[in-house]
Amino acid sequence: MSAKPGEFTVIGRRQPRLDGFEKVSGRAVYTDDIVLPGMLHGRILRSPHPRARIVSIDASRALALPGVKAVISSRDFPDVLFSERQPLFARDTANYIGEEVAAVAAVDAITAEEALHLIDVTWEPLPAATTLREALRNGAPRIHDWAPGNVGPTHEKDYGDPDLGFAESDLVVEDQFRTPMQHNTLTEFHVALADWSKPEKLTVWTPTQSAPMYQQNLAKGLGLTESQVRIVYNNIGGAFTGRGRPKPHHFIAALLSRRTGRPVKIRAAGDEEFIMFRGSGETQYRFRTGVTRDGRIKAIEMDITFDSGGHAEWVMILWLPAAVMNWLYHAKGSRYRGRFILTNSVPKGSHHGGIFGRISAGWMQHMTRVAEAIGMDPAEFHLLNAMDPGDTGLDGTHFASCGLKECIRAVVERSGWKQKYGKLPRYRGIGIGIGAQASGSKGAANDTSAAMVKVDGDGLVTLFTGIPDMGQGSHTVMSMIAAEVLGIEPADVRIVAGDSDVVPFDWGAFSQRGTFMTGNAVKNAAEDARKQLAAVAAQLFGVPESELRFGARRVFPASSPQKALSFAQLVGKTFNSPEGRYVMGRGFFNSPRAFGPLACSFGAQVAEVEVDPATGAVKVLKVTAAHDIGRALNPLGVEGQLDGQVFSGMSQVLYEECKTDDGQVLNPSRLEYKLPRTWELPAVEYILVETIDPYGPFGAKEVGEGPIVVTMAAIASAVANALGVGMVEEIPMTPWRVRAVLDRMPG
């Protein structure tokens, strides 16, 4: 459903990005562009071994080097923890190649690098387990005393009655799947500039998705209160779940600054990016689904084993899939089992798609196989079992809006699915995938976004917001929301963001919460400002406030448009009234739900691919993408997000993999870590399904990571279809893996 003619003046417009010129002209300032007076350069000494005992550390030669101002290690800060059980610097034992052992601060980067080579560390190498297979074998070295069998945290959850569901099934299908270690490949390398020269205040300049999370973690680890930590985040060169919490280099930069009394910057070198990033690790999946003969899903089961690396840092990865697996289909019950396995490798986090993109690449292949096993068209199978508006998932998530079936029908029609499925020539394939994603999943009682609006006498508006713009266009959308409410233009709204000491609280840009949560806060703040202006306008015009209209930079009574005042004139009269009111609006939004999402987006995509049987190379020809966005606040921005996520999803399914040997990443650069080029992006047909969510700002929902989950599913299913196999059990589906599948096929 689209907006009615005349319903909005700004919302629904194809609005170019307001920060576009700053970005393309090179004027945008990023953290690494900042240089402070007296700034030092920090470098980190890292373990060269996957597992080894630290016998001794001698920093005397490094400290004697001219220009070196400090060397620190665990003996200087033995009680500083990075995570619950993880010391900031390795104490007695280093558990992965790249683990932080010591750090230096020097007058320039070259001196700092030279000093690292002058730190003498005596090592005693220990037996290591660098892969899932090695860590789980009998007799494997025990990496941490608290993790018998190298099994770390686990999460197990049943919803409904899965045992009854499987008992009522006529057919149960089971499949295995694997995903590798993958890197988020952020445009902006990891960097932190810390100034703790005054003991009562730590300021950290760094790219981040969540300033409050950085404040809380740094304050807790360093013995400060949250208000004693200031986070400045400027422009951000991508995040993709990779900047959700601080990393060791943030703490180390702060401690070096405290020790030297000067600002310290630590910036990742190219290969260091592959140590510092905390991307996805090797993961093994088992999918099991029970269905009736007529195609009704009765039970769903997922069993997932994650390589968490040398320390279990991102425990939330364990429980995220448990809820999401209940958002697509009706079923009698579902079962989830997840576990972390400790290995002597870099600690792991999540890739773009919030872990569920990778899951979906296997799960949707599995669901296609289930459909085909009972003789059903996969699209019809999805449609038969899909959620409807008003449904509630087994986990308790309620879908006040849901365009899943509309998305499925749209991509089936627009892609020519019925004319192509099962009828394409050999090595041409077509696949369908569906998915759901949270629009701001509440994980804390104060999962709040707040905003402030300041209206100046010339009619220009300043919006203070904590939401970071990481390239997704959030600031443009926030300007559109404020402009719509106040009846002005987006260009009339100036954004102040990126400084936790200046802007109001905002949990940040993760869990697809930006448009939904911050958008509601901005809308509320703008409405507060408008209400103040309307009170004055009502007196001037002699009409009730309900009769006033704000639009086209004017304010007027609905019955007498000719009596209009310009927006700037009304602001001036408000400020120069007997009250002397300076207009400042404030607003916040905190989901009324206790836990989980208040709304979900849904999507369906059909991908068409071609496989070269001689080389195994896969070419994605076209992706037809339908996404339930609630309302398209900025259709141009939505299409840009869809393009980006199709590109990233294709990249993960077909290209991306960190190759490792004995815990060492062998391809730690943009030259060796394979990514597609821009010209490899397939033709993308956009279908924006507008369901108008009752909780979203103007009815909007997310388009953050929702589409990528579906892209990975559709492309993986299309490749399996092209090869004529039920399932390709591993990504990336590189030429050599595809050739191996072809070589195993008869004939």
Image: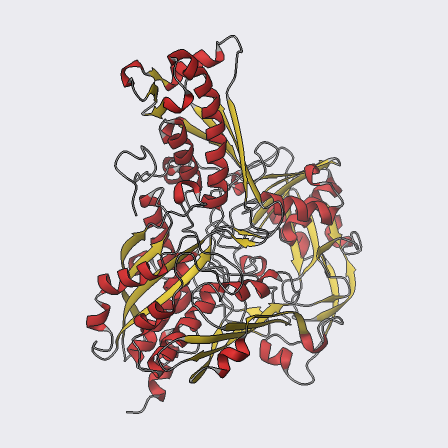
Q: What residue is drawn where x is 43% and y is 13%? A: 539
The answer to which quarter of the image holds residue 363 is bottom left
Q: Is residue 62 above or below residue 350?
A: above
Outermost front residue: 544
Q: What residue is drawn where x is 77% and y is 60%? A: 57
583 displayed left or right of 378: right
Image quadrant containing the C terminus = bottom left
Give coordinates of residue 653: x percent, y percent: 40, 68
Q: What residue is drawn where x is 24% and y is 69%? A: 417
416 displayed left or right of 603: left
653 or 480, nearer to the observer: 480
Q: Is residue 340 visible?
A: yes
Outermost top residue: 578
Give coordinates of residue 270: x percent, y percent: 52, 56
628 or 741, nearer to the observer: 628
The answer to which quarter of the image holds residue 436 is bottom left
Give coordinates of residue 716: x percent, y percent: 37, 71
Scheme of image coloration: secondary structure
Give coordinates of residue 532: x percent, y percent: 48, 21
Q: Count how many numbered circles sit on residues in the image.
A: 0
Q: Is residue 47 above or below residue 60?
A: below
Q: Is residue 675 visible?
A: no
424 displayed left or right of 148: left
Outermost bottom residue: 747
285 displayed left or right of 722: right
Q: Is residue 625 above or below residue 281?
A: above
